[in-house]
Image: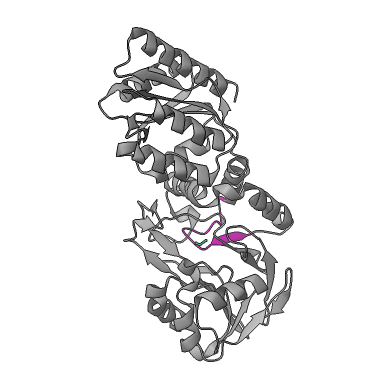
């Protein structure tokens, strides 16, 4: 495996082939926790790994330099998938000073016993000479936590971009041009939708700040390193950060005895009368990770729920709660659903869509028990209305 970014700059992270659950995010292709080693007159480790993989990280470092030679450990981000290994790494590297910003120091102090750590707080744009090379630090708040920072290797034009441009993608290849770009971009999109989506404005601010840098490589903390296709991921970020809608309609439903499903299929049939992409999703059979990835770039969305115990179906409530938290912007939509004696499922779904500031295409479309021909035609008409919105995207 090629782990050399450039002369004396190495990937020393951990490939997590097995992980399938990342705080609820279904990581179907695993992940990596990327750490990087810059060897110069002074040696710097940029970021760490999850706690269980600290020994693997130390072994990788030792394949390049003895642990006593590690002078600096940069912590760009305190989230435990990157900082969890720090206590073991700080113990094993007796001469290392940890470099982080003030907010990160506060977060690390609240996660770990840092009393024995040598810590140097760095300021936004501060530089640190390692010898022939220089590190520069840039605060990138809320990409993806308040303390998030990126580190720039000035002379080489390498940006250690933390979570930004990352992918949960385990692979034996470390670089974009060694990998299947379609797979990488799909995982980058899934990562953005499930991790970064609520932070579009901070992402835009960070891209504006960093836009003047020469970027020969962008090395995120998950997935492959961008050295040949950065323009591709950058263009995708520029669309994702504003939730730029595609000509696409997503219809998600949760049925009890098939009536809400029949309504959903009629909505989809109506939408398919126009030349737009239509995705019909049974939430009982689809993970929320995939659902939000589909919703992120749709123009129009419909949520259908049967009524259970005078409320929304619990599985649909979970999906809509997840979507609401991730704040997909700029969608139009409506809610629908079958019920027995009170239209609670569709009403509650409509409140979720309202909370997500979806522009209503129509009022909730409810029906008692099985939909009749008139109801199914109303569903098809609503589907056509969704598609008309998508056509204008
Ligand atoms: Fe990969 Fe926000 O941590």
> Does 332 sit above or below residue 175?
above
Residue 195 as seen in the image, left or right of residue 338: right
The residue stretch that appears in magenta: 216-229
Instruction: Report if residue 295 lies within the magenta region.
Output: no
> Does 328 sit above or below residue 9?
above
Residue 326 as seen in the image, left or right of residue 346: right
Is 6 or 187 nearer to us in this picture?
Answer: 187
Residue 2 as seen in the image, left or right of residue 214: left
**Location of residue 372 (image quadrant):** top left
Outermost residue to the top: 374
Q: Where does the image place residue 212, in percent across and percent down from the top left?
A: 74, 56
Q: Where does the image place residue 229, in percent across and percent down from the top left?
A: 55, 50
Is 249 or 178 nearer to us in this picture?
Answer: 249
Outermost residue to the left: 257
Identity of the residue drawn at 74% across and 73% down: 126
Q: Where does the image place residue 39, in percent across and percent down from the top left?
A: 57, 80
Q: Give the total of numbered labels.
A: 0
Report the quarter where the N terminus lies: bottom left
**Location of residue 128 (image quadrant):** bottom right
Identity of the residue drawn at 36% across and 56% down: 21
Identity of the residue drawn at 40% across and 10% down: 377
Is 280 or 2 nearer to us in this picture?
Answer: 280
Q: Where does the image place residue 137, in percent across and percent down from the top left?
A: 68, 69
User: How is the model colour-coded?
Assistant: one colour
Report the quarter where the C terminus lies: top right
> Does 375 sit above or below residue 147?
above
Identity of the residue drawn at 61% across and 64% down: 148
Is residue 323 visible to the viewer in this orientation of the structure?
Answer: yes
Dominant secondary structure of the magenta stretch?
A: loop
Is 38 or 388 nearer to us in this picture?
Answer: 388
């Amino acid at each position: 495996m090629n782990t050399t970014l450039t002369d004396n700059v190495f990937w020393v992270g951990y490939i997590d082939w097995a992980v399938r659950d990342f705080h609820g995010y279904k990581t179907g292709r695993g992940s990596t926790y990327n750490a990087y080693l810059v060897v110069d007159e002074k040696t710097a480790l940029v970021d760490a790994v999850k706690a269980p993989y600290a020994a693997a990280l130390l072994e990788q470092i030792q394949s390049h330099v003895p642990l006593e030679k590690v002078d600096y450990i940069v912590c760009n981000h305190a989230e435990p998938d990157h900082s969890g290994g720090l206590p073991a790494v700080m113990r094993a590297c007796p001469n290392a000073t940890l470099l982080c910003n003030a907010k990160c120091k506060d977060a690390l102090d609240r996660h770990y016993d840092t009393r024995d750590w040598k810590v140097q707080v760095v300021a936004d744009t501060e530089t640190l000479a390692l010898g022939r090379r220089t590190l520069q630090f840039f605060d990138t708040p809320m990409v993806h936590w308040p303390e998030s920072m990126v580190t720039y290797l000035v002379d080489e034009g390498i940006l250690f971009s933390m979570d930004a441009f990352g992918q949960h993608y385990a692979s034996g290849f470390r670089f974009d041009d060694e990998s299947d770009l379609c797979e990488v971009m799909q995982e980058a999109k899934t990562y953005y939708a499930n991790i970064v989506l609520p932070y579009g404005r901070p992402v835009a601010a960070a891209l504006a700040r960093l836009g003047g840098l020469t970027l020969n490589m962008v090395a995120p903390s998950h997935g492959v390193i961008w050295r040949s296709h950065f323009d591709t991921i950058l263009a995708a970020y520029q669309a994702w950060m504003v939730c730029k809608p595609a000509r696409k309609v997503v219809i998600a439903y949760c049925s009890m005895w098939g009536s809400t499903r029949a309504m959903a299929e009629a909505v989809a049939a109506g939408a398919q009368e126009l030349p737009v992409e239509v995705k019909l999703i049974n939430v009982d059979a689809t993970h929320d990770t995939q659902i939000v990835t589909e919703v992120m770039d749709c123009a129009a969305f419909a949520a259908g729920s049967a009524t259970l115990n005078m409320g929304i179906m619990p599985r649909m409530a979970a999906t809509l709660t997840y979507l609401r938290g991730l704040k997909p912007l700029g969608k139009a939509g409506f809610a629908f659903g079958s019920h027995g004696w009170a239209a609670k499922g569709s009403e509650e779904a409509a409140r979720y869509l309202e909370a997500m500031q979806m522009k209503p295409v129509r009022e909730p479309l409810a029906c008692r028990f099985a939909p009749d021909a008139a109801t199914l035609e109303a569903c098809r008409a609503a589907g056509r209305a969704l598609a008309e919105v998508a056509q204008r995207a």
